[in-house]
């Protein structure tokens, strides 16, 4: 029931059959960094046998692109949210997750958000209890209170929490955006499945460059 050991892969597909053409509007959007905690990232092979970082490994690509999006969001006034699961969860809180994943993270170090993309002052960290960021949280109300109805999603794992959060956002009339190269997953196949499902059913799937271009177009006055 532990997390699998994840071999390096790269997700390079920039063509997705999006059924919608929503633009990312910095006045409407928030950025969600989903579960990029030490516990979940430990499952990935990030270095070679000599301890050198593998730049082509999707988890490293996703972290680098998350950093780019964080810097842009902060500069553009886009609110930033994180999800983070707590360690040593009471079985009464964890419930059915135990049947699939066991007891979960057990140490404070594993619960830490990666230093490379750590929250800045003014960012919000949501306690994460289930796959979706909306379960047992006030995330939806925070978005409503701030007049935001778009959700940019990066993090892990693409086909589990990231996709579930996108689908639930859609059902709450919040426009989700899955950033394909800002995500990582158990495998390239599951990563692709998540992006294909999202683009056809509940979200617009974009690359980091496309998200940044949308934001820049509004800042430059190109969008009405």
Image (cartoon, rainbow, N blue to C red):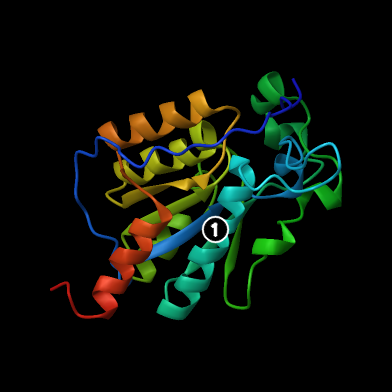
Give the left or right position of residue 129, taking residue 111 as reference.
left
Residue 102, x across and y down, in percent: 76, 25
Q: In which quarter of the image is residue 20?
A: top left
> As rendered, which of 4 and 108 lies closer to the eye?
4
Residue 6, x across and y down, in percent: 69, 29
Which image quarter is the N terminus in?
top right
Report the residue at 47% width, 56% height from top: 139
Give the left or right position of residue 128, taking residue 52 as reference.
left
> As rendered, which of 130 and 47 lies closer to the eye?
47
Residue 200, x across and y down, in percent: 26, 32
175 to 122, vertically: above or below:
above
Look at the image and tell me whether residue 93 can be seen: yes
6 to 15, vertically: above or below:
above
Look at the image and tell me whether residue 129 can be seen: no
Give the left or right position of residue 57, taking residue 197 as reference.
right
Q: Mark 1 points at which residue?
A: 66
Residue 131, x across and y down, in percent: 55, 37
Q: 10 Å neighbourhood of mark 1: few (<14), some, or many (≥20)?
A: many
> As rendered, which of 120 and 86 lies closer to the eye?
120
Number of dots carrying numbers: 1
Which image quarter is the C terminus in?
bottom left
Report the residue at 25% width, 74% height from top: 218
Secondary structure under the numbered disc 1 in the rendered image: helix
34 to 74, vertically: above or below:
above
Q: Residue farthest to the left?
A: 224
């Amino acid at each position: 029931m532990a997390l699998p050991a994840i071999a390096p892969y790269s997700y390079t597909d920039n063509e997705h059959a999006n059924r919608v053409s929503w633009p990312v509007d910095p006045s409407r959007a928030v950025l969600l960094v989903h579960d990029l905690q030490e516990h979940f990232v430990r499952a990935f092979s990030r270095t070679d046998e000599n301890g050198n970082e593998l730049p082509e490994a999707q988890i490293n690509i996703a972290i680098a692109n998350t950093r780019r999006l964080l810097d842009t969001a902060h500069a553009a006034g886009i609110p930033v949210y994180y999800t983070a699961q707590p360690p040593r969860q009471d079985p009464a809180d964890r419930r059915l997750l135990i049947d699939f994943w066991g007891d979960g993270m057990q140490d404070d170090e594993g619960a830490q958000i990666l230093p490379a993309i750590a929250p800045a002052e003014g960012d919000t960290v949501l306690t994460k209890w289930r796959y979706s960021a909306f379960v047992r949280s006030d995330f939806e109300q925070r978005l409503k209170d701030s007049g935001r109805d778009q959700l940019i999603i990066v993090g892990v794992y693409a086909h589990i929490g990231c996709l579930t959060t996108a689908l639930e956002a859609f059902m709450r009339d919040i426009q989700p955006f899955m950033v394909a190269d800002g995500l990582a997953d158990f495998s390239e196949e599951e990563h692709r499945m998540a992006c294909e499902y999202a683009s056809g059913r509940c979200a617009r799937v974009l690359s980091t460059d496309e998200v940044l271009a949308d934001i820049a177009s509004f800042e430059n006055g190109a969008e009405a």
